[in-house]
């Protein structure tokens, strides 16, 4: 095997060990080297575009560790730094793709149409890791 292709194979194998990625709604950014940097996995600047988020939306993660505790939080605002509203939590017991449970009833309906950020955190033997998604609320 050529050295270059061996390096490519090793790089692919390493990327499989990514802790978790938020796939829906779109993540603000993912870099496994700084995914443990709160509150948004090393990405402090909100996305230029925002998905519409409602109670019928999905929050989907690809989880690559063997177990962990996931929590879903939310903050209303253009660029929040703290996430006071807990929407849900769940134990993840194996690798896989999960739709995380959440309940928007704790969000006041006066925030319909407002910008908000969803924060996913997962605690495991690798520490606590973060992903965020910037959305517009449809309540
Ligand atoms: Cu991990």
Image (tube, grey):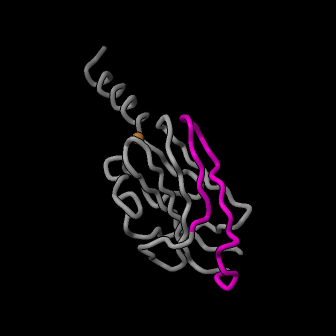
Percent position of residue 53, x then y: 65, 67
Q: Quadrant of ligand 1?
A: top left
- Pick whichever, 48 or 60, lies toward us: 60
User: In the image, is residue 5 part of the stretch drawn in magenta?
Assistant: no
Segment colored magenta: 86-111
Q: Is residue 110 left or right of residue 126?
A: right
Placement of the C terminus among the 4 image quadrants: bottom right
At a point 39% along the width and 57% down the height, the residue shown is 41
Q: Is residue 92 left or right of residue 109?
A: left
Percent position of residue 47, x then y: 47, 68
Which residue in the rendered view is the most extreme toward the left?
3
- Pick whichever, 6 or 125, lies toward us: 125
At a point 56% along the width and 77% down the height, the residue shown is 115
Quick check: 58 above or below 134? above
Q: How many marks?
A: 0
User: In the image, is residue 102 part of the stretch drawn in magenta?
Assistant: yes
- Pick whichever, 114 or 67, lies toward us: 67
At a point 64% along the width and 82% down the height, the residue shown is 111
At a point 61% along the width and 59% down the height, the residue shown is 88
Which residue in the rendered view is the most extreme toward the bottom?
110
């Amino acid at each position: 095997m050529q050295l270059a292709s061996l390096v490519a194979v090793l790089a692919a194998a390493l990327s499989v060990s990514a802790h978790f990625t938020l796939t829906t709604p779109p993540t603000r950014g993912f870099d496994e080297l700084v995914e443990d940097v709160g509150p948004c996995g090393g990405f402090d600047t909100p996305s230029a575009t925002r998905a519409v988020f409602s109670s019928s939306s999905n929050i989907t993660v690809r989880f690559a560790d063997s177990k962990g505790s996931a929590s879903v939080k939310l903050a209303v605002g253009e660029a929040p730094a703290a996430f006071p509203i807990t929407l849900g939590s769940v134990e993840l017991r194996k690798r896989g793709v999960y739709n995380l449970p959440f309940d928007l009833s704790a969000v006041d309906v006066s925030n319909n149409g407002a910008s908000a950020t969803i924060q996913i955190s997962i605690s495991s033997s690798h520490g606590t890791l973060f992903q965020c998604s910037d959305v517009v609320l449809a309540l």
